[in-house]
Image (cartoon, rainbow, N blue to C red):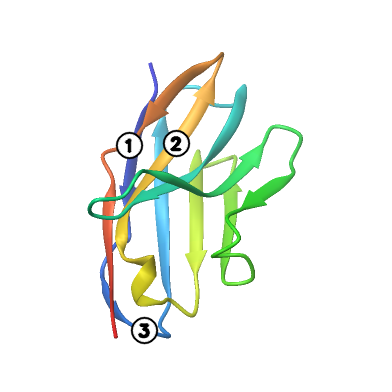
Amino acid sequence: QVQLVESGGDLVQAGGSLRLSCVASGIISNFMRMGWHRQAPGEQRELVAEIVRSGSTNYAASVKGRFAISRDNAKNMLYLQMNNLKPEDTAVYYCHVIIDYFNYWGQGTQVTVSS
């Protein structure tokens, strides 16, 4: 069983930065994909950034060049560095891992960007 716990969400002004963290309990070394999704009020959940097992990364067009995803294998941690935040980045951010075709989600952390 894998459990994911996010942290780092906060209220920040536009142009500011935040780093989200996700700690995973359980074995995730055989992950297929891991990443961050977000969901704004009234909107569908969308992919923000992910790391594929091959090591390649994918980013939503809206965050490319501003956000960076990384992981620390030794600590079972996943990070999302978010720079130059915009009000439209306001959402609940979820950590997500796919292992053996099972989807695991964290509870989410709120990011609010004020203009």
What is the distance, in whole Å, between disc 1 and disc 3 at their CAs?
26 Å
**Residue at disc 1, secondary structure:** loop
- Dot 3 crowding, Cα within 10 Å, few <14, some 14–19, many 20+: some
Q: Which mark is residue 96?
A: 2
Give left or right: position of 38 versus 65: left
- Dot 1 crowding, Cα within 10 Å, few <14, some 14–19, many 20+: some
Residue beneath disc 1? 106
Q: Amino acid at mark 2?
A: His
Answer with mark 2 or mark 1, whichever residue precedes in sequence. Answer: 2
Residue lying farthest to the front in this orientation: 42
**Residue at disc 3, secondary structure:** loop
105, 30: nearer the viewer: 105
Quadrant in the picture for residue 99: top right
Circle 2/circle 1 CB separation < 8 Å: yes
8, 88: nearer the viewer: 88
Residue beneath disc 3? 14
What is the distance, in whole Å, between disc 2 and disc 1 at their CAs?
7 Å
Quadrant in the picture for residue 17: bottom left
Give the number of the mark in front: 1 or 3: 3
Residue 12 in the image: state x and y as whole percent: 29, 78
